[in-house]
Image: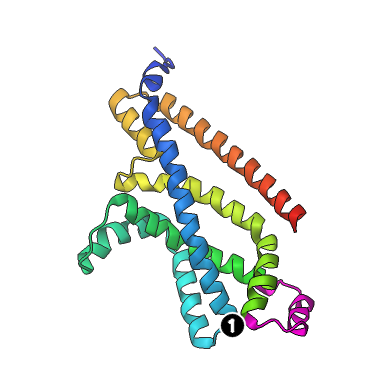
Amino acid sequence: MGYALNFNLIWRHFDKLWGGLLLSLELAVISIAIGIVIGLVLAVWYVSAGRVVRTIIAAYVEFIRNVPLILLVYLVFYGLPTVVDIAYSAQTSFVATLALYSGAYLVEVFRSGLEAVPRGQIDAGKAIGLTPWQRLLHVRLPTMLRITLPALSNTFISLFKDTSVASVISVPELTYGAQWINFNTFRIVEVYLVVTAMYLLTGYALLYALRLLERWFRAAH
């Protein structure tokens, strides 16, 4: 006999998926918030510091961008505690890893945005007597944010999907919930169909909300 779809067992354990989805969103939000700070600070340093600082920042960016995320997760969760006397939960470890991962990509996003600020705006800030810090805070950063907001939105959507990697260290996010249900019910097709739909619907909802935010920000500025 052929395989017969049966979603009853999936709905019975749907709380695992729903709780996992909420945790995935939480991991993505916290990680990108920290990643924005990392990326913004390093981008400002990159465009204003000397060659040594630029080389260090560029090395960090290239290392993160050329190493698979799953390998970084293993290095931070399993490798780092064996070298340094440190202990942390799987969830904390993953947030730290994803924040460093997103920060490396956002360095390039913010750097490009800062360098795209029209020179005339910066000169106008100088002309009215703004200090370098004031020009950064009131001229360059608002313009940079307007330029980079679409890329920032795409990064967040990508991070939300990347939270699935947390399942390899038993963080109970959405994919881990699917694996748990599959192991206990053996309804592999049904559970992954449901999880696929949850990722798709959540991703499109986030994209729609972020596009609304972009339009509001452009209108307000």
Q: According to the image, label 1 marks what residue?
A: 48
User: Residue 41 location in percent, x, y?
Assistant: 52, 72
User: Residue 126 location in percent, x, y?
Assistant: 74, 83
- Viewer-proximal residue among 25 and 189: 25
- Viewer-proximal residue among 118 and 102: 118
User: Residue 29 location in percent, x, y?
Assistant: 48, 50
Quarter the N terminus occupies = top left
Is residue 3 among the parts visible in the rendering?
A: no
Say how the picture is coloured.
rainbow
Question: Magenta stretch: residue 81 in it?
Answer: no
Q: Is residue 133 above or below residue 215?
A: below
Task: Rate crowding at label 1 as few (under 14), some (14 to 19) or many (20 or more) other CA atoms within 10 Å.
Answer: few
Q: Is residue 153 above or below residue 11?
A: below
Secondary structure under tag 1 reads: helix
Is residue 63 among the parts visible in the rendering?
A: yes
Residue 45 in the figure: left or right of residue 69:
right
What secondary structure prevails in the magenta region? helix
- Residue that lies at the very extreme toward the front in this rendered image: 129
Q: Is residue 153 above or below residue 3?
A: below
User: Residue 82 location in percent, x, y?
Assistant: 20, 64
The region drawn magenta spans: 114-132
Quarter the C terminus occupies = bottom right
Residue occupying the point 32% across, 24% down = 186
Residue 37 in the figure: left or right of residue 212:
left
Q: Amino acid at mark 1?
A: Ser
